[in-house]
Image: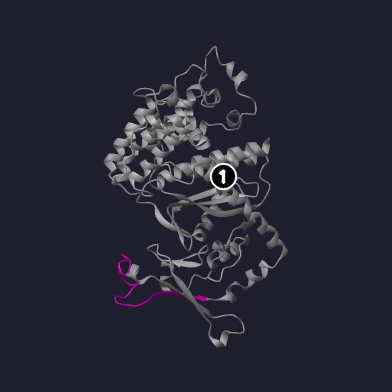
């Protein structure tokens, strides 16, 4: 049975909040700016309304997720801190003496209540609406880019994950007292997973034996993460693969296994739209959806600012049709070829190479130009060559690679006349001035990763990644709104 949280809190200690939670506290400001009743309305259908034990308010559970996104802590640590941090209790609409939830309740809330809920668009639209109401958004430009997030699982072997977490725990202990090395159990280095698990259990037991030591916040957090890995994550790490995650490329010689979050942001640095895809997806293909989502959130779009990945022919035609200026420099490969199978090969602007349907990147390219086109620069053909050894064992080789072929290439015809209008636009002062705004989204991507834990997925699957993106972007947008209002 669900209860609405908007009930009056009767406690003789409520005045404590005015004494210990400053007026400029970010959590107090978020509470004042946002009416969280929309969470109740959105999740009401996920609960039984008239039967069973009273459930914890979905608004309070959602606020716990927000605290995780803002402070980048585990379920156990965020609940532990809410026992004594008065700003947390104030934000959660609790009386000072109220007990907190069990950490497992937060996990169940994510898995059972937030399935099939489009939180990503809902939360972004909510923050954009608040920004518009407060007169923060004045520009009519959106800046677009993507940021990559590594999958939580399959980045390392289970043993390697345990090694990292146990090492972090030992470091936390030695920072307090290096002489404590004598109480630590002997490390194992035989490569056997079961022995590593046993060592981690002994390490936790040894640290917990010292009650003062184990209650240091830094040590306590490291113990909780290690225990969480052993008890909850190890089975998934050992037996499952994140089926939704894919290999993406940042440059020619660097790749990642995980997801991409494609973002649109105003010049005031408010995120207006986002889509989450697997790591191999091409940035430019998400442009139209980002524009449409931004407009649905209430943004008037006159300019789109991005890098060369967004300057493909389809986007140029779309921008012209919608009477939008596309501030993105052309790449020579914007046409994406003229072959029937061109949709199976996508251009990676960072590596200046093509990636095939299987996620393999070309290893070299050649460029030729017929003599009759030498003067006007048209008719150049660029050929991208792939590793034949990978092609031989590729699940998509039928119709793409012929057995015993010594080479596999994909050719692109560059048609500069198709883009001449945009080439002229690139030389204008307006284009050059607006291009200077693009750096802002790089800083926003860095903030998401380094301050809010967006560099690694907190769970497996595309749905889990969308949830993480939704809550993280909501928190980041609210912080930005408060900064601009302050």
Q: Is residue 73 magenta?
A: no
Residue that carries the numbered disc 1 in the rendered image = 447
**Residue found at the very far top of the displayed protein:** 12
Q: Which residues are magenta?
A: 392-413
- Quadrant of image for the N terminus: top left
- Quadrant of image for the C terminus: top right
Against 17, is 245 above or below?
Answer: below
Q: Nearer the viewer, residue 325 or 271?
A: 271
* Res. 184 visible in picture: yes
Q: Is residue 265 left or right of residue 242?
A: right
For mark 1, does the 10 Å Cα neighbourhood hold few (<14), some (14 to 19), or many (20 or more) residues? some
**Residue found at the very far bottom of the displayed protein:** 372
* Res. 58 visible in picture: no
Q: Position of residue 459 (x, y in %)?
A: 40, 42
Image quarter of residue 115: top left
Q: Position of residue 421 (x, y in %)?
A: 64, 71
Q: Secondary structure at mark 1?
A: helix
Image quarter of residue 16: top right
Q: Position of residue 288 (x, y in %)?
A: 53, 57
Q: Is residue 136 left or right of residue 46?
A: right
Q: Nearer the viewer, residue 208 or 356?
A: 208
Q: Nearer the viewer, residue 248 or 3?
A: 248
Q: Is residue 158 left or right of residue 75?
A: left
Image quarter of residue 439: bottom right
Residue at 39 percent across and 23 percent down: it is 54
Residue at 65 percent across and 56 percent down: it is 302
Against 445, is 306 above or below?
Answer: below
Q: Position of residue 210 (x, y in %)?
A: 40, 23
Q: Is residue 393 magenta?
A: yes
């Amino acid at each position: 049975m669900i209860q609405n949280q908007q009930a009056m809190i009767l406690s003789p200690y409520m005045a404590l909040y005015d004494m210990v939670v400053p007026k400029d506290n970010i959590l107090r400001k978020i509470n004042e700016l946002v009416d969280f009743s929309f969470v109740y309305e959105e999740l009401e259908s996920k609960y039984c309304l008239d039967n069973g034990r009273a459930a914890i308010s979905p608004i309070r559970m959602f606020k716990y997720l927000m605290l995780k996104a803002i402070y980048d802590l585990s379920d156990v640590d965020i609940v532990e801190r809410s026992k004594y941090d008065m700003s947390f209790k104030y934000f959660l609409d609790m009386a000072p003496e109220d007990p907190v939830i069990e950490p497992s309740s937060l996990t169940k809330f994510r898995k059972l209540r937030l399935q099939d809920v489009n939180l990503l668009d809902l939360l972004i639209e909510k923050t954009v609406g608040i920004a518009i109401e407060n007169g923060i958004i004045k520009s009519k430009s959106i800046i677009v880019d993507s940021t990559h997030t590594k999958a939580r699982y399959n980045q390392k072997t289970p043993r390697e994950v345990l090694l990292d977490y146990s090492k972090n725990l030992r470091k936390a202990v030695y920072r307090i007292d290096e002489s404590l090395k004598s109480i630590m159990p002997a490390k194992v280095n035989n490569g056997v997973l079961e022995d590593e698990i046993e060592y981690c259990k002994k390490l936790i037991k040894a640290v917990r034996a010292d009650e003062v030591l184990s209650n240091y916040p830094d040590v306590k957090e490291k113990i909780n993460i290690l225990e969480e890995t052993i008890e909850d994550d190890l089975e998934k790490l050992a037996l499952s693969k994140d089926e939704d995650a894919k290999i993406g490329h940042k440059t020619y010689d660097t790749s990642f296994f995980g997801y991409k979050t494609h973002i649109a942001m105003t010049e005031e640095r408010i995120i207006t739209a986002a889509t989450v895809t697997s790591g191999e997806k091409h940035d430019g293909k998400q442009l139209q959806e980002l524009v449409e989502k931004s407009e649905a959130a209430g943004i008037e779009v006159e300019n789109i600012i991005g890098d060369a990945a967004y300057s493909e022919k389809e986007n140029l035609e779309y921008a012209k049709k919608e009477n939008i200026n596309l501030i993105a420099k052309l790449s020579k490969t914007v046409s994406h070829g003229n072959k029937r199978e061109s949709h199976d090969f996508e251009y990676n602007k960072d590596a200046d190479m093509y990636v095939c349907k299987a996620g393999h990147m070309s290893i070299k390219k050649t460029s030729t130009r017929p003599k009759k086109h030498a003067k006007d620069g048209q008719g150049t053909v660029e050929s991208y060559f792939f590793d034949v050894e990978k092609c031989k064992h590729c699940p998509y080789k039928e119709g793409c690679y012929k057995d015993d072929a010594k080479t596999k290439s994909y050719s692109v015809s560059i048609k500069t006349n198709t883009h001449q209008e945009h080439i002229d636009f690139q030389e204008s002062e307006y284009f050059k001035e607006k291009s200077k705004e693009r750096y802002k989204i790089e800083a926003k991507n860095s903030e998401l990763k380094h301050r809010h834990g967006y560099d690694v997925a907190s769970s497996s699957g595309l749905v889990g990644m969308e949830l993480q993106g939704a809550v993280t972007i909501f928190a980041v947008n609210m912080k930005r709104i408060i900064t601009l209002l302050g």
